[in-house]
Amino acid sequence: MTDTRHALVVRGGWEGHQPVAATERFLPFLAANGFDVRIEESTAVYADAAAMAETDLIVQSVTMSTIEPAELAGLRGAIEAGTGFTGWHGGIADSFRASSDYLQLVGGQFATHPAVGPGETRLEGEENFRDYTVNITDLGRTHPITAGLDDFDLHTEQYWVLVDELNDVLATTTHPAEAWQPWHRPHTSPVVWTRAWGRGRIVVTTPGHSLDVLDNPSVRTIIERGMLWAARTA
């Protein structure tokens, strides 16, 4: 590799997750760590074989939306060849819902974010904000992305995600079995996971609904360390 590494920031989709403002927060960090950063406002770049071949890290913030077959093939091919892939919240865990091949790639899909209980205050735009704890797993306590971090609390959407067994889970959260909910026992869902795909590394972080969550010191540390860990290693 050359001394300069190349990061590709791909953003778009649902504006409620503020993809531009959210990704702008991390551009100085990428530059300070030696990345030349290219920004694209659509996934069309994924179909550009030359651009993808020189990309060491993809940071994606595209909630929902759709992806063309050639774009997805380019994304998967780049990761298999060693390009890192990371993102947060719906920008990676709720992208391209109709694409089963994308869901297989990232190893998880947003299912819901349970609301607060009846009678509790529900501010407009915060109907699904809850107080919850992020628990670092045993693996997470030794992994470069989360080592040294303690369990921490958030007040935001608590993602319930559907995942598979290829993920290495670094942090979890538990959805309680509240009397008014239809499920009957607590459910533990991953909050941060990594995934090996070919020669590439994938990191998914589920908090990040709003800018204040991205500014949480623990969340920001996880995302930034995840970028460095995911970036091409050879």
Image (cartoon, helix red, strand yellow):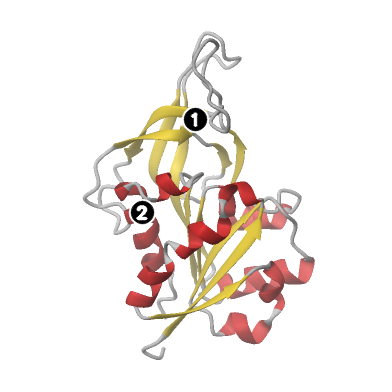
Kind of element beneath mark 2: helix
Between discs 1 and 2, the one toward the N terminus: 1
Residue 229 position within the rendered picture, expressed as x and y whole percent measured from the top left: 37, 66
| Quarter occupied by residue 10 | bottom right
81 and 36: which one is in front?
36
| Quarter occupied by residue 101 | bottom right
For the point 71% across and 48% down, which residue is it?
97
Residue 9 is left or right of residue 95, and the answer is left
Residue 8 position within the rendered picture, expressed as x and y whole percent measured from the top left: 54, 74
Whether residue 169 is visible here, answered yes or no, is: no
Which residue extends farthest front? 124
Residue 205 position within the rendered picture, expressed as x and y whole percent measured from the top left: 46, 50
Residue at the spot of label 2: 220
Above/below status of 148 relative to 24: above
Whether residue 197 is visible here, answered yes or no, is: yes
Residue at the spot of label 1: 129
Within-10-Å neighbours for mark 1: few <14, some 14–19, many 20+:
some
Residue 64 is left or right of residue 79, and the answer is right
| Quarter occupied by residue 102 | bottom right
Q: Could you tell me the amino acid type at mark 2?
A: Arg
Kind of element beneath mark 1: strand
Q: Quadrant of the N terminus?
A: bottom left
Q: Quadrant of the C terminus?
A: bottom left
Disc 1 to disc 2, C-alpha distance: 19 Å
Which residue extends farthest bottom? 2
For the point 67% across and 75% down, which residue is it?
45
28 and 199: which one is in front?
28
Within-10-Å neighbours for mark 2: few <14, some 14–19, many 20+:
some
Above/below status of 49 relative to 113: below
Residue 227 is left or right of residue 95, and the answer is left
Q: Name the disc covering residue 150, or none.
A: none
Q: Could you tell me the amino acid type at mark 1?
A: Phe
